[in-house]
Image (spheres, rainbow, N blue to C red):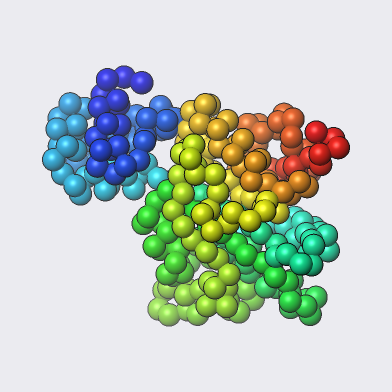
Amino acid sequence: MNQDLLRISEIMLKKTNRNVSSLNIDFFKNTINDRQLKCGIKTVSEYINFLENDINEINALSQQLSNTTSQFFRDDLTFSLLEYTLLPHLIIQHDKKREIRVWSTACALGQEPYSVAILLEELQGKLGTIIPYRIFGTDISEYALTQAQKGIYDFNDVEKAKLKVVEHYFTKKDKSYFLNDSVKKHVHFSKLDLVDENSLHPIDGIYGGFDLIFCCNVLIYYQPKQQRLIIDKLIGALAVNGFLIIGEAERLLVTHHDQLKHLGFNTSIFQRKSRKSE
Ligand SMILES: C[S@@+](CC[C@H](N)C(=O)[O-])C[C@H]1O[C@@H](n2cnc3c(N)ncnc32)[C@H](O)[C@@H]1O
Protein backbone atom coordinates (compact mmCIF):
# COMPACT_ATOMS: atom_id res chain seq x y z
CA MET A 1 0.00 0.00 0.00
CA ASN A 2 1.46 3.40 -0.95
CA GLN A 3 2.01 6.33 1.45
CA ASP A 4 -1.14 8.17 0.30
CA LEU A 5 -3.41 5.21 0.99
CA LEU A 6 -1.69 4.66 4.34
CA ARG A 7 -2.32 8.29 5.29
CA ILE A 8 -5.98 8.02 4.25
CA SER A 9 -6.26 4.81 6.31
CA GLU A 10 -4.86 6.62 9.36
CA ILE A 11 -7.34 9.47 8.96
CA MET A 12 -10.25 7.05 8.58
CA LEU A 13 -9.16 5.00 11.61
CA LYS A 14 -8.92 8.15 13.72
CA LYS A 15 -12.23 9.66 12.58
CA THR A 16 -14.44 6.60 12.05
CA ASN A 17 -12.72 3.89 14.07
CA ARG A 18 -12.69 1.63 11.00
CA ASN A 19 -9.49 0.02 9.73
CA VAL A 20 -9.68 0.38 5.94
CA SER A 21 -6.05 -0.63 5.33
CA SER A 22 -7.14 -4.27 4.86
CA LEU A 23 -9.40 -3.46 1.90
CA ASN A 24 -8.55 -4.75 -1.55
CA ILE A 25 -6.02 -2.21 -2.89
CA ASP A 26 -7.63 -1.77 -6.33
CA PHE A 27 -11.05 -1.17 -4.79
CA PHE A 28 -9.54 1.30 -2.31
CA LYS A 29 -7.60 3.20 -5.04
CA ASN A 30 -10.58 3.33 -7.41
CA THR A 31 -12.84 4.64 -4.64
CA ILE A 32 -10.35 7.42 -3.81
CA ASN A 33 -10.07 8.35 -7.52
CA ASP A 34 -13.83 8.47 -7.73
CA ARG A 35 -14.14 10.67 -4.61
CA GLN A 36 -11.47 13.02 -6.04
CA LEU A 37 -13.45 13.34 -9.27
CA LYS A 38 -16.72 13.94 -7.41
CA CYS A 39 -15.06 16.63 -5.26
CA GLY A 40 -13.31 18.20 -8.27
CA ILE A 41 -9.87 17.70 -6.69
CA LYS A 42 -6.92 16.97 -8.97
CA THR A 43 -4.19 15.46 -6.76
CA VAL A 44 -4.29 12.88 -3.98
CA SER A 45 -2.34 15.13 -1.60
CA GLU A 46 -4.95 17.90 -2.04
CA TYR A 47 -7.67 15.30 -1.42
CA ILE A 48 -5.93 14.16 1.79
CA ASN A 49 -5.85 17.78 3.09
CA PHE A 50 -9.52 18.17 2.24
CA LEU A 51 -10.46 14.85 3.86
CA GLU A 52 -8.66 15.73 7.09
CA ASN A 53 -10.78 18.84 7.55
CA ASP A 54 -14.19 17.88 6.19
CA ILE A 55 -16.44 15.58 8.17
CA ASN A 56 -18.95 15.36 5.30
CA GLU A 57 -16.25 13.97 3.04
CA ILE A 58 -15.18 11.50 5.75
CA ASN A 59 -18.77 10.25 5.85
CA ALA A 60 -19.08 10.15 2.05
CA LEU A 61 -15.83 8.18 1.69
CA SER A 62 -16.80 5.84 4.52
CA GLN A 63 -20.15 5.14 2.87
CA GLN A 64 -18.56 4.53 -0.53
CA LEU A 65 -16.04 2.13 1.00
CA SER A 66 -19.04 0.10 2.19
CA ASN A 67 -20.78 -0.69 -1.06
CA THR A 68 -24.25 -1.59 0.23
CA THR A 69 -25.77 -2.79 -3.05
CA SER A 70 -28.21 -5.65 -2.42
CA GLN A 71 -31.66 -6.96 -3.35
CA PHE A 72 -34.34 -9.24 -1.98
CA PHE A 73 -33.78 -12.79 -3.35
CA ARG A 74 -30.62 -11.53 -5.07
CA ASP A 75 -29.18 -14.80 -6.37
CA ASP A 76 -31.85 -16.87 -8.17
CA LEU A 77 -30.25 -20.29 -7.76
CA THR A 78 -29.33 -19.80 -4.11
CA PHE A 79 -32.80 -18.67 -3.12
CA SER A 80 -34.51 -21.43 -5.13
CA LEU A 81 -32.37 -24.03 -3.39
CA LEU A 82 -33.10 -22.43 -0.04
CA GLU A 83 -36.83 -22.44 -0.68
CA TYR A 84 -37.17 -25.96 -2.04
CA THR A 85 -34.28 -27.89 -0.47
CA LEU A 86 -32.18 -26.34 2.29
CA LEU A 87 -34.81 -24.73 4.50
CA PRO A 88 -37.21 -27.73 4.32
CA HIS A 89 -34.17 -29.94 5.17
CA LEU A 90 -33.25 -27.73 8.15
CA ILE A 91 -36.85 -27.77 9.38
CA ILE A 92 -37.03 -31.58 9.28
CA GLN A 93 -33.57 -32.09 10.80
CA HIS A 94 -33.49 -29.46 13.47
CA ASP A 95 -33.71 -30.34 17.11
CA LYS A 96 -37.26 -29.38 18.10
CA LYS A 97 -36.00 -27.94 21.38
CA ARG A 98 -34.02 -25.22 19.68
CA GLU A 99 -34.70 -22.57 17.08
CA ILE A 100 -33.25 -22.51 13.56
CA ARG A 101 -30.48 -19.93 13.61
CA VAL A 102 -29.44 -17.84 10.63
CA TRP A 103 -26.73 -15.17 10.36
CA SER A 104 -26.43 -12.73 7.47
CA THR A 105 -22.93 -11.38 8.06
CA ALA A 106 -22.86 -8.36 5.72
CA CYS A 107 -26.56 -7.72 5.54
CA ALA A 108 -26.53 -4.26 3.86
CA LEU A 109 -30.03 -2.75 4.13
CA GLY A 110 -31.51 -6.02 5.37
CA GLN A 111 -32.66 -7.46 2.04
CA GLU A 112 -30.80 -10.78 2.54
CA PRO A 113 -31.90 -11.69 6.10
CA TYR A 114 -35.45 -10.49 5.42
CA SER A 115 -35.59 -12.69 2.28
CA VAL A 116 -34.85 -15.73 4.47
CA ALA A 117 -37.49 -14.64 7.00
CA ILE A 118 -40.06 -14.41 4.19
CA LEU A 119 -39.16 -17.91 2.95
CA LEU A 120 -39.53 -19.31 6.48
CA GLU A 121 -42.86 -17.54 6.94
CA GLU A 122 -44.06 -19.04 3.65
CA LEU A 123 -42.91 -22.52 4.69
CA GLN A 124 -44.74 -22.21 8.01
CA GLY A 125 -47.91 -21.43 6.08
CA LYS A 126 -47.42 -24.42 3.73
CA LEU A 127 -46.59 -26.87 6.53
CA GLY A 128 -49.24 -25.49 8.88
CA THR A 129 -46.80 -25.50 11.77
CA ILE A 130 -44.83 -22.99 13.83
CA ILE A 131 -41.11 -23.06 13.06
CA PRO A 132 -39.04 -21.42 15.79
CA TYR A 133 -36.29 -19.39 14.13
CA ARG A 134 -34.06 -16.41 14.76
CA ILE A 135 -32.18 -14.42 12.17
CA PHE A 136 -29.25 -12.11 12.89
CA GLY A 137 -28.20 -9.41 10.45
CA THR A 138 -24.86 -7.69 11.00
CA ASP A 139 -22.93 -5.12 9.03
CA ILE A 140 -20.09 -2.66 9.55
CA SER A 141 -22.14 0.27 8.23
CA GLU A 142 -24.33 2.04 10.77
CA TYR A 143 -26.17 3.76 7.95
CA ALA A 144 -27.06 0.35 6.45
CA LEU A 145 -28.25 -1.00 9.80
CA THR A 146 -30.46 2.02 10.48
CA GLN A 147 -32.06 1.62 7.06
CA ALA A 148 -32.44 -2.14 7.60
CA GLN A 149 -34.34 -1.54 10.82
CA LYS A 150 -36.70 0.84 9.03
CA GLY A 151 -37.46 -1.78 6.35
CA ILE A 152 -38.43 0.71 3.62
CA TYR A 153 -37.41 -0.19 0.07
CA ASP A 154 -37.82 0.90 -3.52
CA PHE A 155 -38.78 -1.04 -6.62
CA ASN A 156 -35.18 -2.09 -7.46
CA ASP A 157 -34.90 -3.79 -4.07
CA VAL A 158 -38.01 -5.91 -4.49
CA GLU A 159 -38.08 -6.50 -8.24
CA LYS A 160 -36.81 -10.11 -7.94
CA ALA A 161 -39.45 -11.07 -5.38
CA LYS A 162 -42.56 -12.90 -6.59
CA LEU A 163 -45.58 -10.61 -7.01
CA LYS A 164 -47.58 -12.53 -4.39
CA VAL A 165 -44.69 -12.12 -1.92
CA VAL A 166 -44.57 -8.37 -2.52
CA GLU A 167 -48.34 -8.11 -2.12
CA HIS A 168 -48.38 -10.20 1.05
CA TYR A 169 -45.33 -8.93 2.95
CA PHE A 170 -45.03 -5.28 1.88
CA THR A 171 -47.31 -2.28 2.04
CA LYS A 172 -46.85 0.01 -0.94
CA LYS A 173 -47.11 3.75 -0.34
CA ASP A 174 -46.32 6.03 -3.27
CA LYS A 175 -43.07 4.59 -4.68
CA SER A 176 -41.91 2.92 -1.45
CA TYR A 177 -42.38 -0.63 -0.22
CA PHE A 178 -42.74 -0.91 3.58
CA LEU A 179 -41.88 -4.37 4.91
CA ASN A 180 -44.53 -5.66 7.31
CA ASP A 181 -43.78 -6.09 11.02
CA SER A 182 -44.61 -9.81 10.82
CA VAL A 183 -41.29 -10.23 8.96
CA LYS A 184 -39.28 -7.43 10.59
CA LYS A 185 -39.75 -8.84 14.09
CA HIS A 186 -37.76 -11.99 13.23
CA VAL A 187 -34.52 -10.22 12.31
CA HIS A 188 -32.15 -8.78 14.94
CA PHE A 189 -29.64 -6.26 13.64
CA SER A 190 -26.33 -5.27 15.20
CA LYS A 191 -23.00 -3.77 14.16
CA LEU A 192 -20.17 -6.22 13.59
CA ASP A 193 -16.86 -5.82 11.76
CA LEU A 194 -16.01 -9.18 10.17
CA VAL A 195 -12.35 -8.24 10.01
CA ASP A 196 -12.13 -7.49 13.72
CA GLU A 197 -10.41 -10.48 15.32
CA ASN A 198 -12.26 -9.92 18.60
CA SER A 199 -15.81 -10.04 17.20
CA LEU A 200 -16.63 -13.66 16.56
CA HIS A 201 -20.40 -13.51 15.97
CA PRO A 202 -23.39 -11.29 16.82
CA ILE A 203 -23.25 -10.42 20.49
CA ASP A 204 -26.72 -11.79 21.22
CA GLY A 205 -26.11 -14.91 19.12
CA ILE A 206 -23.67 -16.63 21.42
CA TYR A 207 -25.61 -19.80 22.15
CA GLY A 208 -24.66 -22.63 19.83
CA GLY A 209 -23.75 -22.74 16.16
CA PHE A 210 -25.61 -21.27 13.22
CA ASP A 211 -27.53 -23.53 10.85
CA LEU A 212 -27.15 -21.11 7.97
CA ILE A 213 -24.60 -18.32 7.44
CA PHE A 214 -24.55 -15.89 4.52
CA CYS A 215 -21.30 -14.17 3.60
CA CYS A 216 -22.12 -12.77 0.18
CA ASN A 217 -20.35 -10.09 -1.80
CA VAL A 218 -18.09 -8.87 0.98
CA LEU A 219 -14.97 -11.09 0.79
CA ILE A 220 -14.13 -9.56 -2.61
CA TYR A 221 -13.48 -6.20 -0.94
CA TYR A 222 -10.65 -7.53 1.24
CA GLN A 223 -7.07 -8.74 0.91
CA PRO A 224 -6.33 -12.51 1.07
CA LYS A 225 -5.25 -12.41 4.74
CA GLN A 226 -8.55 -10.87 5.83
CA GLN A 227 -10.50 -13.20 3.54
CA ARG A 228 -8.96 -16.18 5.35
CA LEU A 229 -9.63 -14.63 8.74
CA ILE A 230 -13.31 -14.09 7.87
CA ILE A 231 -13.77 -17.60 6.43
CA ASP A 232 -12.22 -19.27 9.51
CA LYS A 233 -14.38 -17.14 11.79
CA LEU A 234 -17.54 -18.17 9.95
CA ILE A 235 -16.67 -21.87 9.93
CA GLY A 236 -16.13 -21.60 13.70
CA ALA A 237 -19.62 -20.12 14.08
CA LEU A 238 -21.29 -22.72 11.84
CA ALA A 239 -23.00 -25.78 13.34
CA VAL A 240 -21.75 -29.16 12.12
CA ASN A 241 -23.72 -29.88 8.91
CA GLY A 242 -24.75 -26.21 8.80
CA PHE A 243 -24.68 -24.32 5.48
CA LEU A 244 -22.42 -21.46 4.40
CA ILE A 245 -23.57 -19.33 1.47
CA ILE A 246 -20.95 -17.29 -0.36
CA GLY A 247 -21.23 -14.77 -3.20
CA GLU A 248 -20.97 -16.17 -6.71
CA ALA A 249 -17.69 -14.31 -7.38
CA GLU A 250 -16.22 -15.58 -4.10
CA ARG A 251 -16.85 -19.29 -4.51
CA LEU A 252 -13.26 -20.23 -5.33
CA LEU A 253 -12.09 -18.73 -2.04
CA VAL A 254 -13.69 -21.58 -0.10
CA THR A 255 -14.04 -24.41 -2.62
CA HIS A 256 -11.03 -26.32 -1.30
CA HIS A 257 -11.47 -25.63 2.39
CA ASP A 258 -10.94 -28.90 4.27
CA GLN A 259 -13.87 -28.34 6.65
CA LEU A 260 -16.39 -27.58 3.92
CA LYS A 261 -18.18 -29.70 1.34
CA HIS A 262 -19.38 -27.97 -1.84
CA LEU A 263 -23.03 -28.75 -2.57
CA GLY A 264 -22.32 -28.63 -6.29
CA PHE A 265 -25.04 -27.85 -8.84
CA ASN A 266 -23.09 -24.73 -9.79
CA THR A 267 -24.05 -23.20 -6.46
CA SER A 268 -22.09 -21.14 -3.98
CA ILE A 269 -23.40 -23.20 -1.07
CA PHE A 270 -21.16 -25.20 1.24
CA GLN A 271 -21.88 -27.52 4.15
CA ARG A 272 -19.72 -27.84 7.24
CA LYS A 273 -18.41 -31.41 7.36
CA SER A 274 -19.44 -33.61 10.23
CA ARG A 275 -16.75 -34.38 12.81
CA LYS A 276 -16.33 -37.94 11.49
CA SER A 277 -15.22 -36.75 8.06
CA GLU A 278 -13.07 -33.86 9.36
C1 LIG B 1 -22.32 -5.45 -1.63
S1 LIG B 1 -23.03 -5.50 -0.02
C2 LIG B 1 -23.58 -7.17 0.07
C3 LIG B 1 -24.94 -7.29 0.69
C4 LIG B 1 -25.53 -8.69 0.70
N1 LIG B 1 -24.71 -9.61 1.45
C5 LIG B 1 -25.73 -9.20 -0.70
O1 LIG B 1 -24.96 -10.02 -1.17
O2 LIG B 1 -26.66 -8.75 -1.36
C6 LIG B 1 -21.54 -5.52 1.00
C7 LIG B 1 -21.84 -5.22 2.47
O3 LIG B 1 -20.70 -5.60 3.24
C8 LIG B 1 -20.58 -4.67 4.30
N2 LIG B 1 -19.22 -4.78 4.85
C9 LIG B 1 -18.05 -4.39 4.28
N3 LIG B 1 -17.02 -4.67 5.09
C10 LIG B 1 -17.53 -5.27 6.19
C11 LIG B 1 -16.97 -5.80 7.38
N4 LIG B 1 -15.65 -5.74 7.59
N5 LIG B 1 -17.78 -6.34 8.30
C12 LIG B 1 -19.13 -6.38 8.09
N6 LIG B 1 -19.73 -5.90 6.98
C13 LIG B 1 -18.93 -5.36 6.04
C14 LIG B 1 -20.89 -3.35 3.65
O4 LIG B 1 -21.21 -2.35 4.60
C15 LIG B 1 -22.06 -3.73 2.75
O5 LIG B 1 -23.29 -3.55 3.40
Q: Quadrant of the N terminus?
A: top left
Residue 159 visible somewhere in the drawing: no
Q: Quadrant of the C terminus?
A: top right
Q: Nearer the viewer, residue 48 or 238?
A: 238
Side of 25 where 51 appears, left or right: left
**Residue reaching furthest right?**
276
Q: Nearer the viewer, residue 36 or 230?
A: 230
Q: Quadrant of residue 19?
A: top left
| 176 shown above or below 205 | below
Q: Residue at x 61, y 49 (%)?
A: 214
Residue 169 visible somewhere in the drawing: yes
Q: Quadrant of residue 3?
A: top left
Side of 214 where 69 appears, left or right: left
Side of 64 where 242 appears, left or right: right
Q: Quadrant of residue 186?
A: bottom right
Q: Position of residue 32 (x, y in %)?
A: 30, 34
Q: Residue at x 42, y 69 (%)?
A: 150
| 129 shown above or below 228 | below
| 58 shown above or below 20 | below
Q: Residue at x 46, y 57 (%)?
A: 190
Q: Residue at x 48, y 28 (%)?
A: 223
Side of 183 where 39 appears, left or right: left
| 15 shown above or below 203 | above
Q: Position of residue 250 (x, y in %)?
A: 60, 36
Q: Position of residue 47 (x, y in %)?
A: 18, 33
